[in-house]
Image: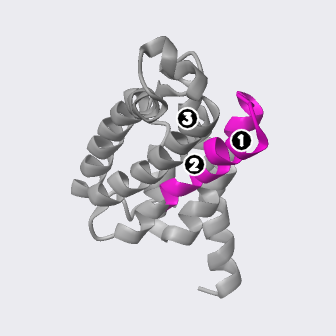
Amino acid sequence: MSKTRFQTQIFAEAIIFVSLSAVLNAIKLTTLPYGGSVTLAGMVPILWLSLRRGVVVGTYAGVVLGLVVLVIEPFIFHPVQVLLDYPIAFGALGLAGLFQKRPVVGVGVGMLGRFIAHFLSGVFFFYMFAANWGLDPVSYSIAYNGSYLFPEFIVSAIIIYVLEKRNALRIFL
């Protein structure tokens, strides 16, 4: 297969996976008041792409997904917060590609990267809501972001595990 055709195939896969992620991300099972939600496995396509094609392709696709989510449902406080909550957080899902031989670990690392970006955003830009919960900003950000990212991680890990057991992680297009 020529290099150009291979690159075109990867680009096409990335578009498909980002689109699928955007659709699944739009199906909310629960939504939190200051951003964040549990979706219908909205992170799985990006994690899957990262595990198939590696960290670089997965990170680029995650950044694109972050920008798509920003356009569809913006929650803007500050320019740095926008970077943390959208392209950086979703781009961090690409870290799963570092663990192609251990997909569930990859899911954990990708979701942890996303959590860290949202955690930092929460501490520095949403700290004023901590008092409503009777918490300090660090504890608040852990609790708030963990309340939707932990269920997202569980769902994503289960689906990726099933796909791995069925050898489906390598089969597509």
| Callout 1 crowding tier (Cα within 10 Å): few <14, some 14–19, many ≥20 | some
Quarter holding the N terminus is bottom right
Residue 52 seen by the camera: yes
Q: Could you tell me the amino acid type at mark 3? A: Gly
**Magenta highlight range:** 68-94
> Residue extending furthest left?
165
Q: Could you tell me the amino acid type at mark 1? A: Val
Q: Residue at x 21, y 55 (%)?
A: 165
According to the picture, the residue beneath numbered tag 3 turns out to be: 122
Q: What element does badge 1 sit on?
A: helix
According to the picture, the residue beneath numbered tag 2 turns out to be: 90
| N-terminal label among 1 and 3 | 1
Residue 161 pos. (x, y %) = 25, 50
According to the picture, the residue beneath numbered tag 1 turns out to be: 82
Residue 35 seen by the camera: no
> 53 or 112, which lies in front?
112
> 11 or 88, which lies in front?
88
Q: Residue at x 41, y 22 (%)?
A: 135
Left or right, 140 with respect to 18, comes to: left
Left or right, 62 with respect to 103, comes to: right
| N-terminal label among 3 and 2 | 2
Residue 124 pos. (x, y %) = 60, 39
Looking at the image, do the residues carrying marks 1 and 2 touch, with CB atoms under 8 Å apart? no
Looking at the image, residue 28 lies above or below residue 158? above
Spatial CA span between label 1 and label 2: 11 Å
| Callout 2 crowding tier (Cα within 10 Å): few <14, some 14–19, many ≥20 | many
Q: Nearer the viewer, mark 3 or mark 2?
A: 3
Looking at the image, residue 22 lies above or below residue 34? below
> 125 or 149, which lies in front?
125
Q: Could you tell me the amino acid type at mark 2? A: Phe
The picture quadrant where one finds residue 2 is bottom right
Left or right, 5 with respect to 146, comes to: right
